[in-house]
Amino acid sequence: MSRINDVGGMVGFPAVIEEPDEPAFHADWEAHVFALNGVMLRRGVYNLDEFRDAIERMPPAEYLASSYYEKWFHAITTLLAEKGIATPEELAGG
Amino acid sequence: MSTTHDDGPLAARVRHVEALLEERGWLADGELDARIDAFAAGGSPANGAAIVARAWVDPGFRERLLADASTAIEELGMSMAAGLQVQPLVAVANTADEHHVVVCTLCSCYPVALLGPSPTWYKSEAYRSRVVRDPRGVLREFGLELPDAVHITVWDASAETRYMVVPRRPEGTDDLSEQELAGLVTRKGLIGTAAV
Amino acid sequence: MADRFAPGDRVRTRTADPPGHTRLPRYARGVCGEIVGTCGRHPLADELAQGLDSAPRAVHQVRFRASDLFGPGEDGRDHAVVVELWEDYLEPTSPDPAPEGDPT
C-alpha cells in the first residue's frame, strides 16, 4: 500500500541537514529502544517485516512528526499489543 | 524534524515497557545493556574504511570485493553475519565516469553490523525522498559537485542486500600506507555523499 | 523452481497497490527497466509482514532510467536508479515469452 514511509521521489521535503560529530544515539532511551527491538526480533515476538509494517501503519502526520526512534518505539508497542504480550493500557502505564 | 526532543516522558515510557517485559519474562535483567555494549563494539565506519583502503592498494582484492563483497570482507576478518541475519553485501566502485550513492527510500536499510549506525540524515525523509529524483542537487548540498560528464547511479536498498560505495582513491596519495589511506575514508564516502 | 527472469531481461514493474506492506516503492511502479543482477532468493516481505510462511524466490536488481521514473530532469541530465525487487513485482515487457501459470 502507498503509505507515508514510501517517500522516494516525493517533492517538497527540505534540504538535507547534517549533524556534525553525530553520536550513535542521542539519548539513553534511543539505545534502549534499539536494543529492545533486537531482543524482540531474536525472541520471535515479531519479525522484521512486521516491524516495518507497524511503522508504516502510523498515521501520516504522526509519522512525519516523530523522530526515528520514536517511530521504532511506536512500532514495538503496537506489536506488543497486537501479539497479546500486554494490553495498550498496560503498555501506556496508565 | 527537530533534533531536540523533550525526552523525559518518552524515556519514562520506554523504562515502563522494559519493566513490564522483564516482569513477564520477555526480557532478562541486563539483557538490553549487553546488547547495547555488543552493538557499540561491533560495526564501525572504520571497517568500511579498511575495506576501501585494501581495495585501493590491492587490485586483486578490489576485483573480489566488487564480485562478491560478503565473501571478500572475510579476508579482513569481517563478516555480514554479525547482525540478526546474514545479509548480502554489495560494493559498488566509483570511477572517473560513474558515481554511486546509496539510499533506502522505504525505511533505513544500511549495513549496520558492518558500518555501525547510519547518520540521522540518511534516515530522514528529506534524503530518502530527494536523492532518487535529484541526486546531483542533493550531493551539491553535501558540498560534492560532480563534473557534468559523470553519470550517477542511485542504489535503493529496498530488499535484502546492503550496499557500500568504494570511493575513488584521491590523487597524490601514492606514498601513503594502507592505514593512512583508510584514515581518508569517511562514512559519507561509504554512502556516496562525499568524494571519499 | 526456475527463476522467471535473468540478468539482461527487460521487465516492467507491477502497477497494483497491494493491500499491506510491500517493498516495491511507489515511484518504481509500472515502469520498464533492465535486470542488472540477482541477489539470491528470499521470502517475500509482503507475506512475512502478514505473519505468513513465504517460500524464497528470486530478488533482482532492476536498473531504471530516472527519466522513465520521474520524467526529464530539470537540468536535462539523466541518472540511473537501481531498485532491488522480488520477482513477484515484475512482468515481462513483451507478452510473447510470458510463461504459463503467471496469474494477475
Image: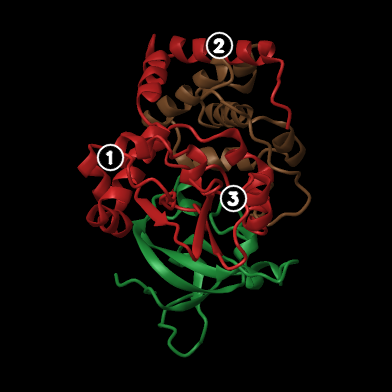
Give the chain ID for the green colour.
C
Host chain of mark 1: B
Q: Nearer the viewer, residue B97 or B161?
A: B97
Q: Earlier in the sequence, mark 2 or mark 3?
A: 2
Give the chain ID for the brown colour.
A
Q: Using the numbered discs, state the Cα–Cα distance from disc 2 to disc 3 in whole angstroms.
A: 31 Å
Where residue A83 sits in the image (x, y, percent)? 51, 31
Query: Which quadrant of the structure image shows residue A61?
Result: top right
The quadrant of the image that shows the N terminus of chain B is top right
Which amino acid, mark 1?
A: Ser
Q: Is residue B145 left or right of residue B75?
A: right
Q: Residues within 10 Å of mark 3 (few under 14, many from 20)?
A: many
Query: Which quadrant of the structure image shows residue B28?
Result: top left
Q: Secondary structure at mark 1?
A: loop
Q: Which residue is mark 1?
A: B79
Q: Which residue is mark 2?
A: B15
Q: Up-down: is B19 above or below B175?
A: above
Q: Earlier in the sequence, mark 2 or mark 1?
A: 2
Q: Up-down: is B32 above or below C101?
A: above
| Chain B drawn colour | red
Query: Exactly how many numbered labels are in the figure?
Result: 3
Let me know if residue B109 appears in the view: no
Between tags 1 and 3, which lies in front?
A: 1
Q: Earlier in the sequence, mark 1 or mark 3?
A: 1
Q: Are marks 2 and 1 in contact (CB under 8 Å)?
A: no
Q: Nearer the viewer, residue B168 or A3?
A: B168
Q: Secondary structure at mark 3?
A: loop
Let me know if residue B104 appears in the view: yes
Host chain of mark 2: B
Of all residues, the one furthest to the bottom in this rendering is: C96
Which amino acid, mark 2?
A: Arg
Q: Which residue is mark 3?
A: B105
